[in-house]
């Protein structure tokens, strides 16, 4: 479904990604782990069109989207749930969800998807007319996920979905992401909670200093001595 071939990204003279290649197959949950500054967020920004790459290419369902606009990439079926949630703080919960489907015109389908989001996130249903900036961190994360789903994506990019959340909310968030995959949506997730990410994914990649150094199933990487020592505290 998604193929990244020798992707190079720079911030000024700093090379953040160095010839990165990875594959996400339809229906998979793939996770990208690594330390702060390894290039994980940069990878997602390049995929979603927020950061034009300096080299390489990105293919989605066979189409070259390397230099496509974020709007076009969203219209093709890639939704980006960014680090830090980034809800629209002065808009209501419902208005935030409506922003997730601004490229759609099927009113009946939008209404049905809105109700599905509220069924999945009852707390959001209770707060649909509440200003998003007044929600708790966990509620804002639910809202960010719901907003991404409102575009009916084929692939969702999750950037650090557990960041800043209480442990019980982290567990619930990961359950929701697994549920999204189980319902047929493909997922590529960046996550610093390496053990949880590897435990829930189908396959994983390790990104270190802008270079992919390991790949395999989640279970394989959990058992890898380098992963255990550097990322799992073992």
Image (cartoon, rainbow, N blue to C red):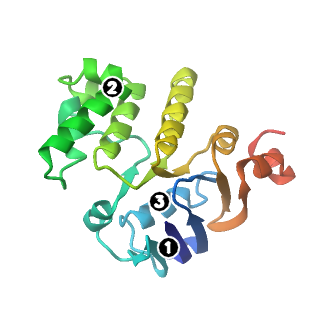
Residue 34 at least partly seen? no
Instruction: Give the labeled residue for mark 2.
Output: 119
Tags 1 and 3 in contact by the CB under 8 Å rule?
Answer: no
- Picture residue at 86% right of the left edge, 50% below the top: 225
List x then y, in percent, for residue 26: 51, 59
Left-right relation of 96 to 1: left
- Position of residue 4 measured from the top left corner of the image (x, y, whole percent): 53, 72
Q: Toward the viewer: 56 or 100?
A: 100
Q: Residue furthest top?
A: 126
- Judged left or right of residue 189, residue 143 is left
Q: Nearer the viewer, mark 2 or mark 3?
A: 2
**Mark 2 or mark 3, which has the lower sequence index?**
3
Label 2 sits on a secondary structure element that is helix
For image coordinates 79% across by 51% down, the residue present is 220
**Real-space Cα distance between discs 1 and 3?**
11 Å
- Quote the CA–CA distance across marks 1 and 2: 39 Å
Q: CA distance from mark 2 to mark 3?
A: 28 Å
The quadrant in which the C terminus is found is: top right
Looking at this view, is 14 or 41 the one in front? 41
Choose between 180 and 45: the one closer to the eye. 180
Q: Which numbered tag is attached to residue 44?
A: 3
Image quadrant assignment for residue 71 = bottom left
Q: Residue 72: name its quadrant.
A: bottom left
Residue 90 shown left or right of residue 82 in the figure: left
Of the two numbered discs 1 and 3 in the rendering, the one whose residue sits closer to the viewer: 3
Name the spot of residue 23 as percent of width and height, x first.
58, 67
Q: How many marks?
A: 3
Q: Which residue is mark 1?
A: 9
Tag 2 and tag 3, C-beta contact below 8 Å: no
- Asked if residue 198 is positioned above or below residue 141 in the image, the reply reads below
In this orientation, which residue lies closer to the viewer: 136 or 76? 76
């Amino acid at each position: 479904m998604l193929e990244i071939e020798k992707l190079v990204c720079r911030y000024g003279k700093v090379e953040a990604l160095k010839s990165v290649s990875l594959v996400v197959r339809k229906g998979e949950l793939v996770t990208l782990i690594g330390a702060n500054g390894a290039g994980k967020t940069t990878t997602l920004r390049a995929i979603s069109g927020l950061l034009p790459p300096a080299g390489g290419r990105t293919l989605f369902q066979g189409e070259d989207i390397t230099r496509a606009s974020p709007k076009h990439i969203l219209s093709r079926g890639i939704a980006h749930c960014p680090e830090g949630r980034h809800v629209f703080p002065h808009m209501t919960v419902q208005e935030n969800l409506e922003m997730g489907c601004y490229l759609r015109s099927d009113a009946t389908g939008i209404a049905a998807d809105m109700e599905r989001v509220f069924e999945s996130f009852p707390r959001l249903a209770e707060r649909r007319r509440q200003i998003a900036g007044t929600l708790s961190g966990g509620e804002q994360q639910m809202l960010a996920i719901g907003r991404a789903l409102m575009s009916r994506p084929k692939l969702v990019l999750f950037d650090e979905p557990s960041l800043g959340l209480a442990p019980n909310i982290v567990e619930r968030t990961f359950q929701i992401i697994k549920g999204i995959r189980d319902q047929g949506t493909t997922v590529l997730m960046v996550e610093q909670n390496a053990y949880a990410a590897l435990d829930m994914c189908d396959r994983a990649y390790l990104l270190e200093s802008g270079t992919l150094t390991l790949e395999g199933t989640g279970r394989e990487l959990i058992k890898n001595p380098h992963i255990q020592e550097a990322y799992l505290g073992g």
